[in-house]
Image: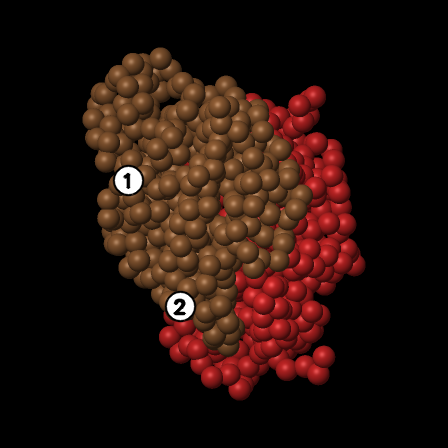
Chain colours: A brown, B red
Amino acid sequence: MAKLDIDGIIRAIRSVIPDQKEPVALHAPCLGGNEWVYLKDCLDSTWVSYLGQYVDKFEAMLADFTGAKKAVALVNGTAALHSALKLVGVNPGDEVFVPVLTFIATANAVTYCGAMTHFVDSEERTLGLDPYKLKDYLKTIGQVNADGCMNKFTKRRIKAVIPMHVFGHPVDLDPLMEVCKEYKIEMIEDAAESLGSYYKGKHTGNWGKLSILSFNGNKTITTGGGGAIITNDENLAKMAKHLTSTAKIPHRWEYRHDYIGFNYRLPSINAALGCAQMEQLPKFLESKRILADRYHQAFKEMEGVRFFKEPSFARSNYWLNTLLLDDAFSERRDELLKKTNDIGIMTRPAWTLINELSMYKDCQAMDLSCAESLAGRLINIPSSAFLVKTNA
Amino acid sequence: MAKLDIDGIIRAIRSVIPDQKEPVALHAPCLGGNEWVYLKDCLDSTWVSYLGQYVDKFEAMLADFTGAKKAVALVNGTAALHSALKLVGVNPGDEVFVPVLTFIATANAVTYCGAMTHFVDSEERTLGLDPYKLKDYLKTIGQVNADGCMNKFTKRRIKAVIPMHVFGHPVDLDPLMEVCKEYKIEMIEDAAESLGSYYKGKHTGNWGKLSILSFNGNKTITTGGGGAIITNDENLAKMAKHLTSTAKIPHRWEYRHDYIGFNYRLPSINAALGCAQMEQLPKFLESKRILADRYHQAFKEMEGVRFFKEPSFARSNYWLNTLLLDDAFSERRDELLKKTNDIGIMTRPAWTLINELSMYKDCQAMDLSCAESLAGRLINIPSSAFLVKTNA
């Protein structure tokens, strides 16, 4: 029978990051490029707020890198999700499928729209939403009519689904697209964690009608705080820009608005930081893949635990590297968390499953057994790009 | 009979700002202090996101300057208003009194809560909400019961009122406080424009249960984009911080949340900018008052127009300097706007009254005749602090 050697796990982590002085963060930014130059330029121009070149430049760099036609830079990923849901027409009383294993923002954005979260299970292959299980589930609960997909039991419309690419690993998007087409459900990709992750050779975020990114301080690139909508629909992109800029009608002096808009624009100084970070993104991704590979090697022969590798159809950014304990050892997860954090190697478990939080405990949900199992066994380990030096 | 001499108005503006190369902005930032030093420090520490010293420092400076016990730095003024309304308990279906002459954010924040805006008239003495007219109006529509103030006609609860200090001039707060006490209505001050403005010797923002500030690029100080809640209630301040930081329960590794929170935190790099700006605020205010005085002198003898002076009980920051045309000349407002903007002197009218926008046209409203008159006659003229040089 397998054993779990917690000291062995710690030695394996240390063997991959030998030169780090502790504490070692889970994910800290690298600010060694043109951050300084662009911020100074921004200050010198006095265009620190919403005007000036950096927002446009950052949006162009995001579109270029992801291959999406348009990007709209926003104040954070949560704001981007909220706007995206509004833009695909999620209305009060609608239901939206949300993976139960995700950061709280995915669910909160649905709540902000007055809509109801409906929780979906994950699959162990991707850590993300299970499209096959969702398809089976819809056979029981879904019915398509002129308004879209109706939940036969709650009588509410199921308007959208938000696959979230957990820790940077892409959800299996093709079968999910098929489900969405069959049941007339809009897809919004929550690619907050997957900048630099590809599904079947194409960057994540290109399957959803709208998709969102995040540039929080712990992400692969950071703008301090920030996010974006990306989309291949130019009209939706225009509308996203308008709606998130207080829906003000352009005029030389008049203040007139034509929608209940949001104040979700990204300031220039944050976009300036983003431009410098985007220039370094290929280098960050290279380092992060080398780091993931080293972890993979270090854990290869270990009993009771495995290093999570990208799904076969994906090239992942390995945003947060992940260990999965064997089922038998889930009860020792907290011991591992405590020991590593105590010695200054930052680690964390998955998010508490959202349906276990009091605000969401009464929401609709399918069987969630895979997510429940993953949440009990999963641990993230230090993943900063600077943990590996490259010549790039 | 009085005449209106538009070329004379332009000459008067130019006489106050003789050395400016056109175009002259309405309000542009001054970034001549420690902005650079603090941003560099922020980058060097890599704490560009939500951790690090600058958010705490900025909040302490705001509390110190305004005399409020606590400040919570947020991503913008709109986010601050939305959070403040939630924190005083504005629920879906409630009504909230909003001045009809304000920036759209004041009304949108109410809508975000699922509550209904109820529009209130302004008074010419302050440009802000008229507390005496509101008191009279409540005699007709208001009825106090155990739940608070009920609107006799709509049967909805009137939960709150949001006095907004227009262009930095304080609303007459004492009589408004009396109305609020009598009718059990919560007050939230929208002090987005009034950092540095005092009512009867005390900084605006100290009357509301919670109040909000804005540090948008066009404000007296800027953080790129930013805002804050200020309050004298330490428990509400704690809750404001928690609710706007995704309501995550502090824990070394666990991700667990206890409310439907918001992601409204101000990033460190924006707070670093704010610290540098706060250091210069007294100097900005001194310059702005000198500028206002010069405008006052320049327009003293002119027919058909007057320069708006602070109310007798107030010391204003003169955020945006304001001209008021005589009633008879409101039809010439657009001519003045066009001529000034054409020659590169930026001017603007008041906001379109919110009840004239399609999204808000069916809302409850009292007689709005004063606001309607003001909106037709009001013009803002260039007001940046750097238009005056001081030795401070």
Question: Which amino acid type corresponds to the residue marked 1 in the rendered image?
Answer: Ser
Q: Secondary structure at mark 1?
A: loop
Q: Is residue A106 above or below residue B336?
A: above
- Image marks 1 and 2: residues in contact by CB distance under 8 Å: no
Instruction: Compare residues B264 and A36 and report the one nearer the observer.
Output: A36
Q: Is residue B157 above or below residue A266?
A: above
Q: Is residue B175 above or below residue B6?
A: above
Residue A391 disc label: 2
Residue B47 in the image: state x and y as whole percent. 59, 59
- Counting residues from the start of the chain, the first of labels 1 and 2 encountered is 1
Please give the residue where the numbered disc 1 appears in the rendered image. A312
Instruction: Confirm whether circles 1 and 2 share one chain.
Output: yes
Residue A124 in the image: state x and y as whole percent. 38, 30
Asked whether the viewer can see residue A268, the reply is: no
Residue B52 in the image: state x and y as whole percent. 64, 57
- The residue positioned farthest toward the right in the image shown: B201
The residue carrying pointer 2 sits among few (fewer than 14), some (14 to 19) or many (20 or more) residues within 10 Å by Cα, namely few
Residue B199 in the image: state x and y as whole percent. 74, 56
Q: Is residue A143 above or below residue A7?
A: above
